[in-house]
Image: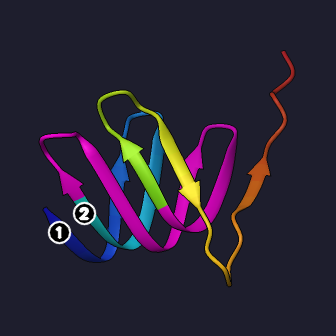
Amino acid sequence: IDAKNNVTVSTGKEIAQSESAFYNDMTKIAILENNVRLQHARGLMTGERAQMNLETGVSSLLGNTTKRVRVLILPKKSR
């Protein structure tokens, strides 16, 4: 499945947004490209490409030669 223009993919624990994405139903892997934002309960990551395994919940974010991966990690809430 190919998607373009303001794509959102959610694993339940993470929400990713990008300009385009490809999802392979056989492998359960989504590849997101172009201005990727990966939001998690404790932070935000941005980069140019991400891979999300919707079966295992494991995600990877990649930069490229002109744009690095950026990560913002929020502290745990005090009890």
The residue stretch that appears in magenta: 23-49
The one nearer the camera, 20 or 60, is: 60
User: The N terminus appears in which quarter of the rendering?
Assistant: bottom left
Image quarter of residue 69 = bottom right
Percent position of residue 24, x then y: 18, 51
> In the picture provided, is 12 more to the left or to the right than 46?
left
Which secondary structure lies at badge 1?
A: strand
Query: What number is the disc on residue 22?
Result: 2
Which secondary structure lies at badge 2?
A: strand
User: The C terminus appears in which quarter of the rendering?
Assistant: top right
Percent position of residue 47, x then y: 60, 67
Residue pointed to by mark 1? 2
Mark 2 residue crowding within 10 angstroms, few (<14) / some (14–19) / many (20+): some
> In the picture provided, is 39 more to the left or to the right than 15?
right
Residue 47 colored magenta?
yes
* Labels 1 and 2 touching (C-beta < 8 A): yes
